[in-house]
């Protein structure tokens, strides 16, 4: 047995064990686990000091998950799936779900309708997905996701990547994963030497809190970066975990020290059973404002929300423009000081008589 499979096995997945360990109500915890399975591998477990610390909150089941508010599939991904387990929403790129498993089961998971449920995947889906990509020449970027692609064996993962690489119009292959953060022991020398054969491969890693950056996760990221894989981060803005400007800024700064470039901060999706993790959008903007200018631009991710109903990601930026027009822009800098900047007027402003309404 490889080291990482033992770490999974020795973790907590049984609701009664979780109840005993964290002092939870066994009956409610069993109910929660019926809705969405529990998985806290022994490495991630070792980072938890108490169930309500920022690491514990992410994986310890909570009776508030039984709350009915929200949607099963808030992003309407099923509607943009031309074949099962592939989402084609944007013009030139798709997401292909290749595994139902993750190294841990995050209690705020957006895909809890699929994740941890073997029945939501059939092995033939991947082949159908690859066939779809092959026959759609506009697809130049494929993100492997799930579940977590790095939960597959090296051999299975290589089979998928090799098939994708053989498609001439697929320029970029991306892997979305939580493994380097939550099960860094899975990042082995053989995984890295396999991946580096198929460049350009990019990886976006899900990190939510500075305490997730440990010697082990740093080592995993170093190995991947040394294999030539550009690493980005994806962070979910979570109440009580990282919804504080100083925590988020520290996370972004620390990610850079392990060669991970902040990419996205996601606003919490409207997933059923996760309302207790939600923050206001204003809070997210406040966090972005606390990062921009106060630390290096390399630390600055995009803050995005995925619109319910399948409209895709919308970036949200704090407003630095106070007003613009008539050849000048009034701006605010990161400290809130106001500046006037001369601007080019593109077209002469033509004052026309208004014929349709007021006649003025
Ligand atoms: C996020 C996402 C992508 C990738 O988007 P980028 O902004 O290019 O990172 C592609 N397809 C779907 C459905 C997505 O949700």
Image (cartoon, rainbow, N blue to C red):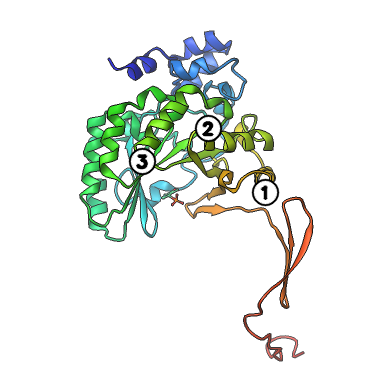
Query: In which quadrant of the rendered view does residue 360 lie?
Result: bottom right
- Mark toward the start of the polypeptide (1 vs 2): 2
Query: How would you rate the neighbour count of disc 3 (Cα within 10 Å): few for under 14, some for 14-19, many for 20 or more?
Result: some
- For label 2, the residue is 108
Compared to residue 289, the image places residue 121 above or below, namely above
Whole-percent x, y for residue 315 in the image: 56, 53
* Residue beneath the point at 53% across and 20% down: 60
Q: CA distance from mark 1 to mark 2?
A: 30 Å
Q: State yes or no: discs 1 and 2 in contact (Cβ < 8 Å).
A: no
- Of marks 2 and 3, the one in the foreground: 3
Local SS, label 2? loop
Whole-percent x, y for residue 168 in the image: 23, 56
* Residue beneath the point at 49% across and 55% down: 311
Q: Nearer the viewer, residue 119 or 140?
A: 140
- Of marks 1 and 2, the one in the foreground: 1
- For label 3, the residue is 228
- Mark toward the start of the polypeptide (3 vs 1): 3
* Residue beneath the point at 41% across and 25% down: 184
Q: CA distance from mark 2 to mark 3?
A: 31 Å
Q: Nearer the viewer, residue 159 or 298?
A: 298
Q: CA distance from mark 3 to mark 1?
A: 29 Å
């Amino acid at each position: 047995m490889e080291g990482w499979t033992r770490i999974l096995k020795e973790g907590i997945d049984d609701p009664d064990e979780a109840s005993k360990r964290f002092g939870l109500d066994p009956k409610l915890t069993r109910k929660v686990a019926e809705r969405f399975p529990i998985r806290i591998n022994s490495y991630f477990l070792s980072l938890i000091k108490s169930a309500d610390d920022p690491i514990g909150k992410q994986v310890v089941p909570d009776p508030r998950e039984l709350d009915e508010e929200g949607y099963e599939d808030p992003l309407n991904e099923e509607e943009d799936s031309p074949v099962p387990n592939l989402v084609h929403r944007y013009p030139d790129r798709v997401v292909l779900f290749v595994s139902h498993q993750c190294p841990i089961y995050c209690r705020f998971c957006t895909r809890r309708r699929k994740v941890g449920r073997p029945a939501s995947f059939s092995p033939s889906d991947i082949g159908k997905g690859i066939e779809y990509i092959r026959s759609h020449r506009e697809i130049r970027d494929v993100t492997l996701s799930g579940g977590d692609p790095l939960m597959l064996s090296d051999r299975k993962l290589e089979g998928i990547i090799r098939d994708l690489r053989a498609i001439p119009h697929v320029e970029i292959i991306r892997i979305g994963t939580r493994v380097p953060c939550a099960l860094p022991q899975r990042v082995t020398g053989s995984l890295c030497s396999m991946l580096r054969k198929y460049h350009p491969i990019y990886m976006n890693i899900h990190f939510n809190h500075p305490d997730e950056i440990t010697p082990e996760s740093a080592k995993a990221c170093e190995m991947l970066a040394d294999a030539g894989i550009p690493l980005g981060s994806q962070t979910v803005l979570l109440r009580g975990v990282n919804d504080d400007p100083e925590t988020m800024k520290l996370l972004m700064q620390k990610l850079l020290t392990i060669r991970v470039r902040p990419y996205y901060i996601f606003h919490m999706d409207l997933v059923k059973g996760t309302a207790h993790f939600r923050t206001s959008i204003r809070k997210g903007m406040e966090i972005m404002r606390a990062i921009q200018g106060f630390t290096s631009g390399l630390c600055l991710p995009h803050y995005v929300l995925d619109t319910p109903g399948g409209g895709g990601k919308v970036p949200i930026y704090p407003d630095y423009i106070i007003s613009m027009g008539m050849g000048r822009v009034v701006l605010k800098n990161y400290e809130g000081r106001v500046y006037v900047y001369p601007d080019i007027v593109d077209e002469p402003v033509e004052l026309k008589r208004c014929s349709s309404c007021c006649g003025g």
